[in-house]
Amino acid sequence: MPVSRADAAGGTGSAADFLPPRLSYPALRKAAAGCRGCHLWRVGTQTVFGEGARKATLMLVGEQPGDKEDLAGHPFVGPSGALLDSALERAGIDRASTYVTNAVKHFKWVPDGTGKRRIHKSPNASEIRACHPWLDAELDAVRPRVVVALGATAARALFGPAVRVLAQRGRVLPTELAAAGFVTVHPSAVLRTPSGEHAAAERAFVNDLKKVARYLGKS
Ligand code: URA
Ligand code: SF4
């Protein structure tokens, strides 16, 4: 493993340093568990790799594991996951037929001051870049027909810095990663929406997923 200056901060600078020689899915998952590509391996409890159908036609990408996911070791199993599950169901998509992952595989958090709660902190550009080889390898292994970014972090990780979630949500985005790409909001953004606007925000999220379902049905 190359030793760089970044090691002093707790990571080599890229997950590429931990890719297995053969990029089979089981080998990837195993290697990701030992990743020290950035300092976040010290911050989160464990690597939360993607999960789901191995040849899923639809891949959903979130930002990073949250508190519950960090402890469970599985993506989208906390409150955001519950909202995602119900939105997928309302859109007519079976989560079991999808592959669900995150742009960053470790939970980044800060203490809340009382030591009782861990507060989510968004990953920065260098952490997202460092973790990208895992996302690329998942795309190569699963080869989904459609890839959906949930929120701005995933959208930038998949489609580049120019993507605009609110302007481009629910529309087909041309991409080399799959036959089509889509962006929509992150389920946690729906959860944070004030109660008066919550139902509308959830409906809009479901509508975006319905467009994905319609695309999958046609193609
Ligand atoms: N938020 C995410 O982006 N991913 C998860 O897995 C959970 C919450
Ligand atoms: Fe590796 Fe990604 Fe975890 Fe950083 S966040 S240590 S790059 S798996």
Image: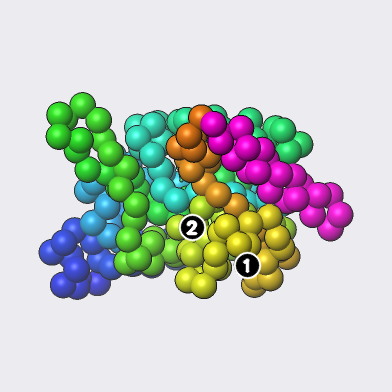
Q: Secondary structure at mark 1?
A: loop
Q: Quarter holding the C terminus?
A: bottom right
Is any part of residue 23 visible from this angle?
A: no
Q: Residue at x 19, y 38 (%)?
A: 111
Pick the front one: 44 or 148 = 148
* Spot occupied by residue 122 in the image (x, y as percentages of width and height): 34, 52
Pick the front one: 209 or 145 = 209
Is any part of residue 47 visible from this angle?
A: yes
- Distance between the alpha carbons at the discs numbered 2 and 1: 17 Å
* Spot occupied by residue 22 in the image (x, y as percentages of width and height): 50, 63
Instruction: Estimate how packed mark 2 is, as few (under 14), some (14 to 19) or many (20 or more) residues with alpha carbons within 10 Å.
Output: many
User: What kind of secondary structure does the magenta stretch mostly adopt?
Assistant: helix
Q: Residue at x 18, y 65 (%)?
A: 7
Q: Quarter holding the N terminus?
A: bottom left
Amino acid type, label 1: Leu
Residue 212, magenta (yes or no): yes
* Spot occupied by residue 115 in the image (x, y as percentages of width and height): 16, 30
Range shown magenta:
196-219
Pick the front one: 152 or 30 = 152
Q: Residue furthest right?
A: 218
